[in-house]
Amino acid sequence: MLTKKKKSKAIKEVQTHTKDTGSPEVQIAILTKQIEELTKHLKKHTRDNHSRRGLLSMVATRQKLMRYLAKKDPKRHKSLVKKIN
């Protein structure tokens, strides 16, 4: 689970303006941080299938947002990929 500090840090890295909380870039950054946290958890708890299902759902959602952003604005997509890795 993401703490408020980690979440706000992820948002500040990619937001387009000061009150940007819902753009695809921000959503992808938050999902990426959540995915990283869950993968750490699943390395310790290999049999936690409920969390694994949630992880797969997050990965699918992030892929959909990435495809949407690549289709809508390729420049923003490329810059986001560079920022997030």
Image (tube, rainbow, N blue to C red):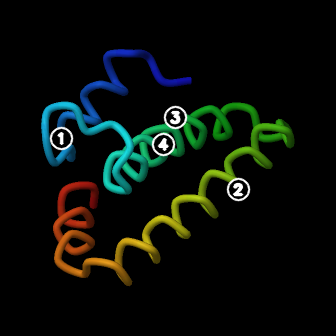
Which residue was labeled with disc 2?
A: 56
Q: Position of residue 38 (x, y in %)?
A: 60, 38
Secondary element under disc 2, as helix, strand or loop, is helix
Looking at the image, residue 79 lies above or below residue 39: below
Instruction: Please state which of the two labelled residues, at mark 3 or mark 2, is closer to the viewer.
Output: 2
Label 3 to label 2: alpha-carbon separation: 13 Å
Which residue was labeled with disc 1?
A: 13
Marks 1 and 2: in contact by CB < 8 Å? no
- Amino acid carrying label 4: it is Glu
Labels 3 and 2: the sequence-earlier one: 3
Which residue was labeled with disc 3?
A: 37
- Amino acid carrying label 2: it is Leu
Label 2 to label 1: alpha-carbon separation: 24 Å
Which residue was labeled with disc 4?
A: 36
Labels 2 and 4: the sequence-earlier one: 4
Instruction: Please state which of the two labelled residues, at mark 4 or mark 1, is closer to the viewer.
Output: 1
The N terminus, quarter of image: top right
Label 2 environment density (alpha carbons within 10 Å; few <14, some 14–19, many ≥20): few
Secondary element under disc 4, as helix, strand or loop, is helix
Residue at the image position 41 percent from the left and 53 percent from the top: 28
Q: Position of residue 13 (x, y in %)?
A: 18, 41
* 60 sits to left or right of 82: right
Label 1 to label 3: alpha-carbon separation: 18 Å
